[in-house]
Image (cartoon, rainbow, N blue to C red):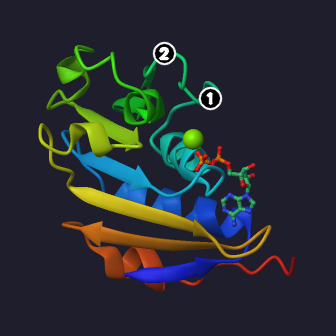
Amino acid sequence: MQTISRSEEQTAAIAARLARRLTPGHIVFLSGQLGAGKTFFIRAAARELGVSEPVTSPSFTLAQSYKGEVTVHHLDLYRLSAYSGDEDADLEPYFEPGAITFVEWPEPLADSFSPDVEVHMGHVSRISRSISITGGVDLKTVFEEPVADTGH
Ligand SMILES: Nc1ncnc2c1ncn2[C@@H]1O[C@H](COP(=O)(O)OP(=O)(O)O)[C@@H](O)[C@H]1O
Ligand SMILES: [Mg+2]
């Protein structure tokens, strides 16, 4: 399913609603160009999952783990996508059954792990983003609940 988010608040609301439908063991892949809002989306989802510490981009470490109501792993594989040489990174521990794992730039994992949910984001304007989500959770309720329009 697909929608246009017209503000950060709308994106955060969609991310939070998706988060509520995730269960431990779920893997979420996020794709879309730089600045599309992948990290923003994950930050809002993690907050909804009870993560209170700041969620930052883990570009230089590949992965960051947070403790909320569940363990939340955030991987950003941009470096693996863009360059070679890091193929030996052992990412298996981040795909444990008790955790929810979000992956930005997931292409290097395509052959190793399959996502339960895929989020694709794209630029529409400075403050608008297309968001499309596919996967085995109840997406209707993620998209259908009214989204507050802040009037930006
Ligand atoms: N509607 C929107 N949804 C998500 N992010 C938005 C929106 N409008 C503006 N932004 C801004 O776009 C930027 C997205 O950055 P980021 O999440 O780091 O992108 P990515 O991880 O995809 O490279 C953030 O600065 C965010 O505040
Ligand atoms: Mg990012």
Q: Position of residue 8 (x, y in %)?
A: 72, 62
The local secondary structure at tag 1 comes to loop
**Which residue position holds label 1?**
56
Residue in the picture at 34% in, 32% down: 70
Q: Which residue is mark 2?
A: 61
Between 68 and 117, the residue placed more toward the observer is 117
**Residue in the picture at 62% in, 29% down:** 56
Q: Which residue is more in the foreground, 111 or 65?
A: 111
Label number found at residue 111: none
If you read the primary sequence from the N terminus, does the residue marked by circle 2 or circle 1 appear first? 1
- Depth check: give the residue in front, 106 or 50: 106
Say what amino acid the circle numbered 1 marks: Thr
The residue that appears at 43% across and 73% down in the rendered structure is: 132
Q: Position of residue 2 (x, y in %)?
A: 44, 81
Amino acid type of the residue that numbered disc 2 sits on in the rendered structure: Thr
Image quarter (top left, top right, bottom left or bottom right) of the C terminus: bottom right
The x and y percentages for residue 106 are 33, 43
- Locate residue 107: give its quadrant: top left
* Residue 76 image point, x, y percent: 45, 33
Vertical comparison of 49 with 30: above or below: above
Q: What is the distance, in whole Å, between disc 2 and disc 1 at their CAs?
A: 11 Å
Q: Within the displayed image, which quadrant is ligand 2 positioned in?
A: top right
